[in-house]
């Protein structure tokens, strides 16, 4: 029923267009007809000037609004009937009004359908139109070789506002209108419409067409000159690039710059490798592995082993974490990057101008002049301003690795990936863990069924989940640390939770202070990250930002992905630069069961109004999972309705972070489920789950009519 108004409106439009062709009304929009009737039309106009104006304007708007052929002839007729001045005035407004009506008609009938069906592919176009749509439309309007009715229809599919479409069309079509109206004043000399536009005139229009693009570039140059106005640019530079921060983003940026033989300096004030190596990915996965070994021992009877027992010291586990960090450390070391051609400076950087960076080291300070700067300063744990939190002391994902005594009662604030990973790891290591989450479920960016699987596993492992609990205050009562919460699901009832240590894992904040950004006036986004354009440039075109400090994703692999763009763009702009591509971004949460995803999930598809189909495969049916006593979880694939094109995949289960790689490749290179189904997967492996979910999709889309015919064929062959 919701489509009925569109259907009825479409029928009306088709009827009007049908009348135009059925009654051969196009014969009146013919150059010969206008020429033969010119005298009669002129006589009638002189006798009825107001009616002539109204009828002509109405017909012109109707022809343009319905995208009918004849607008050019109407324009010539306008010049012949009303003269250059009044013809230009009338046609300028009539053509713009008609084009806007065509735009609105197409938008009403087709916009929602096009955006729903092709929204993922149109995302970049939509963003471009939102940002520079007026420039694009102005360019197209200035070049009459582009059919205007096509421009009207195409622009209707974009987010461009109707008001913007109108005024840009009004201005952009004026030059072409004048040319055609002027030709109409000399109607008797015109032999054909094609004769109006000489190659020279077309060339002139083409030059006019690129004017907005040139103007846009000029505006960018003027903006850059304005932002650089207060700074003195060096006559020469010591370096091509200075990178601030030696985390994932900074390391990859400097490596790429050195690989193309640029002179690059990498400045790090703390430890090489950044958060990922020292306090994030590496230590967390090390402790998760130790904790998982203990969990397998606790489940020994599932594997046919009557009893398994492990004696361990928590301090030894934490020392192993440090050993793993040291084993990985050479990959990110000063020595390695020096060998790769990077000038590594261990010191504190301060940007003193768009081209200079002062670096303070133990031996003094030095000022580096550089053509480009990349800010890759990462992020830090966010600590909420809960009353009493400073007094009781707290741990974060940065400081928890210093523990050598196991907390008997650990309180974890946060139900996201970091909080959930550490919650389960410490629980398996013997702490009594209470996890506080303000929202109604864990991992709120995942689908609800995923959150429920994780919550069920946590509760089965005796983790005390306190969902919909809002921390209110930290206290020390009778020498014991206590968190006072509001139970949001129970009329905000006050709840008191005693604990020994609290781990704050609510999120991370970008590191944007302490290295000169304030002096330069580089703006931040609403979320506190550095504001960059599609090329990862700040408001200073030669200063880039990438990784956690730039967002929008805070994953190590995304930081490395952005680093490629920042490095290449810094090295080769203005000759060539690339827009950062976020079309296929995967992530994983390394809890048990693991949760991995690429592309959109169901809740995002609904939020974005993207049509989809869901195909699932339960890993509890997989032979290898059964043999490994890991028969739980699922593979869930979203596809375009009726097609095998993958929109997103969520995997919950053992090795989900590894299994998702096949779908990352498939989405990146446009491979559908049919080809995954046709690929041999080794038996017995967990990866077979990817093939089986493709098989489920295939069965749901079996060609029933063809199969019935084949069934008859086989029956005929049996005799």
Image (cartoon, rainbow, N blue to C red):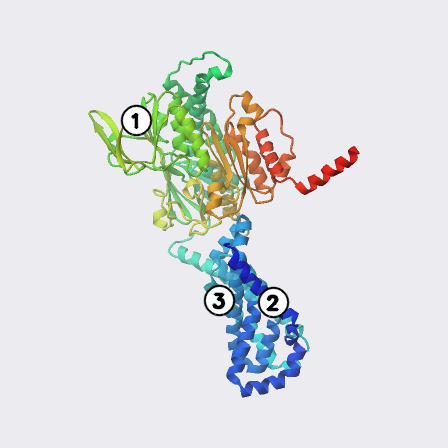
Direction from residue 268 to residue 206 in the image, left or right? right
Q: Earlier in the sequence, mark 1 or mark 2?
A: 2
Q: Distance of mark 3 from mark 2, alpha carbons?
A: 23 Å
Q: To which residue does mark 1 refer? A: 501
Q: Which mark is residue 69?
A: none
- Mark 3, Cα crowd under 10 Å, few <14 / some 14-19 / many 20+, is many
- Mark 1, Cα crowd under 10 Å, few <14 / some 14-19 / many 20+, is many
Q: Distance of mark 3 from mark 1, alpha carbons?
A: 63 Å
Q: To which residue does mark 2 refer? A: 17
Q: Earlier in the sequence, mark 3 or mark 1?
A: 3
Question: In this rendering, does residue 217 appear at all?
Answer: no
Q: To which residue does mark 3 refer? A: 166
Task: Point out residue 678 in the picture as x, y percentages from the top left corner.
Answer: 65, 35
Q: Nearer the viewer, residue 9 or 148?
A: 9
Q: Secondary structure at mark 3?
A: helix
Q: Distance of mark 1 from mark 2, alpha carbons?
A: 75 Å
Q: Nearer the viewer, residue 533 or 446?
A: 446
Task: Point out residue 590 in the picture as x, y percentages from the top left corner.
Answer: 46, 30
Q: Are marks 3 and 2 in contact (CB under 8 Å)?
A: no
Which of the two marks, 1 or 2, is nearer to us in this view? 2
Depicted 138 relative to depicted 710: above or below: below
Residue that appears at 47% across and 15% down? 301
Number of callouts: 3
Depicted 641 relative to depicted 141: above or below: above
């Amino acid at each position: 029923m919701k489509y009925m108004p569109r259907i009825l409106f479409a029928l009306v439009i088709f009827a009007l267009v049908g009348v135009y062709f059925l009654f051969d009304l196009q014969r009146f929009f013919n150059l010969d007809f206008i020429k033969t009737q010119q005298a009669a039309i002129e006589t009638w106009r002189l006798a009825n000037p107001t009616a002539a104006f109204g009828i002509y304007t109405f017909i012109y708007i109707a022809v343009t609004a319905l995208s009918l052929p004849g607008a050019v002839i109407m324009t010539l007729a306008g010049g012949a009937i009303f003269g250059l001045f009044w013809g230009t005035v009338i046609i300028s407004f009539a053509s713009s009004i008609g084009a806007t009506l065509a735009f609105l008609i197409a938008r009403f009938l087709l916009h929602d359908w096009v955006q729903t069906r092709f929204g993922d592919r149109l995302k970049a176009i939509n963003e471009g139109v939102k940002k520079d749509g007026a420039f694009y439309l102005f360019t197209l309007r200035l070049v009459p070789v582009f059919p205007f009715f096509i421009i009207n229809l195409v622009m209707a599919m974009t987010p461009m506002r109707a008001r913007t479409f109108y005024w840009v069309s009004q201005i952009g079509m004026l030059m072409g209108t004048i040319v055609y109206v002027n030709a109409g004043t000399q109607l008797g000399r015109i032999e054909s419409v094609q004769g109006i536009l000489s190659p020279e005139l077309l060339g002139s229009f083409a030059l006019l067409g690129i004017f907005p693009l040139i103007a846009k570039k000029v505006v960018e140059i003027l903006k850059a000159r304005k932002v650089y106005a207060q700074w003195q640019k060096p006559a020469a530079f010591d370096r091509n690039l200075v990178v601030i921060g030696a985390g994932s983003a900074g390391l990859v940026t400097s490596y790429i710059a050195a690989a193309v033989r640029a002179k690059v300096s990498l400045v790090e004030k703390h430890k090489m490798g950044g958060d990922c190596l020292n306090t994030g990915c590496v230590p967390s996965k090390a402790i998760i592995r130790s904790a998982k070994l203990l969990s397998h021992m606790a489940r020994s009877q599932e594997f046919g082993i009557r009893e398994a027992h492990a004696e361990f010291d928590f301090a030894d586990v934490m020392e192993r974490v440090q050993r793993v960090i040291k084993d990985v450390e050479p990959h990110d070391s000063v020595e390695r990057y020096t060998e790769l051609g990077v000038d590594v400076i261990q010191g504190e950087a301060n940007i003193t101008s768009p081209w200079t960076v002062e670096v303070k080291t133990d031996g003094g300070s030095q000022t580096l002049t550089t053509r480009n700067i990349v800010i890759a300063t990462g992020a830090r744990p966010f600590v909420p301003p809960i009353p009493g939190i400073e007094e009781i002391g707290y741990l974060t994902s940065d400081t928890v690795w210093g523990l050598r005594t196991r907390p008997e009662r650990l309180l974890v604030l946060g139900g996201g990936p970091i909080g959930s990973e550490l919650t389960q790891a410490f629980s398996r290591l013997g702490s009594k863990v209470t996890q506080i989450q303000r929202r109604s479920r864990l991992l709120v960016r995942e689908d609800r069924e995923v959150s429920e699987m994780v919550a069920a596993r946590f509760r089965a492992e005796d983790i005390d989940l306190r969902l919909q609990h809002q921390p209110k205050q930290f206290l020390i009562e009778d020498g014991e640390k206590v968190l006072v919460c509001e139970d949001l699901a129970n009329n905000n009832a006050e709840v008191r939770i005693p604990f020994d240590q609290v781990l704050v894992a609510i999120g991370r904040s970008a590191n944007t202070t302490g290295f000169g950004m304030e002096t330069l006036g580089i703006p931040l986004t609403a979320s506190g990250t550095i504001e960059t354009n599609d090329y990862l440039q700040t408001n200073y075109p030669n200063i880039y930002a990438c990784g956690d400090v730039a967002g929008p994703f805070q994953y190590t692999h995304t930081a490395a992905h952005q680093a490629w763009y920042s490095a290449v763009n810094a090295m080769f702009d203005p000759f060539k630069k690339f827009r950062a591509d976020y079309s296929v971004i995967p992530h994983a949460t390394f809890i048990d069961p693991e949760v991995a995803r690429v592309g959109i999930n169901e809740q995002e598809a609904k939020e974005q109004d993207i049509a989809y189909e869901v195909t699932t495969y339960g890993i509890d049916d997989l032979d290898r999972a059964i043999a490994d006593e890991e028969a739980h979880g699922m593979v869930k694939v979203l596809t375009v309705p009726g097609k095998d094109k993958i929109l997103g995949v969520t995997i919950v289960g053992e090795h989900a972070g590894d299994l998702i790689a096949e779908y990352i490749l498939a989405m990146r290179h446009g491979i559908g489920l049919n080809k995954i189904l046709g690929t041999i997967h080794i038996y017995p492996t967990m990866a077979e789950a990817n093939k089986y979910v493709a098989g489920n999709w295939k069965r749901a889309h079996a060609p029933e009519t063809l199969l019935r015919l084949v069934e008859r064929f086989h029956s005929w062959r049996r005799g």
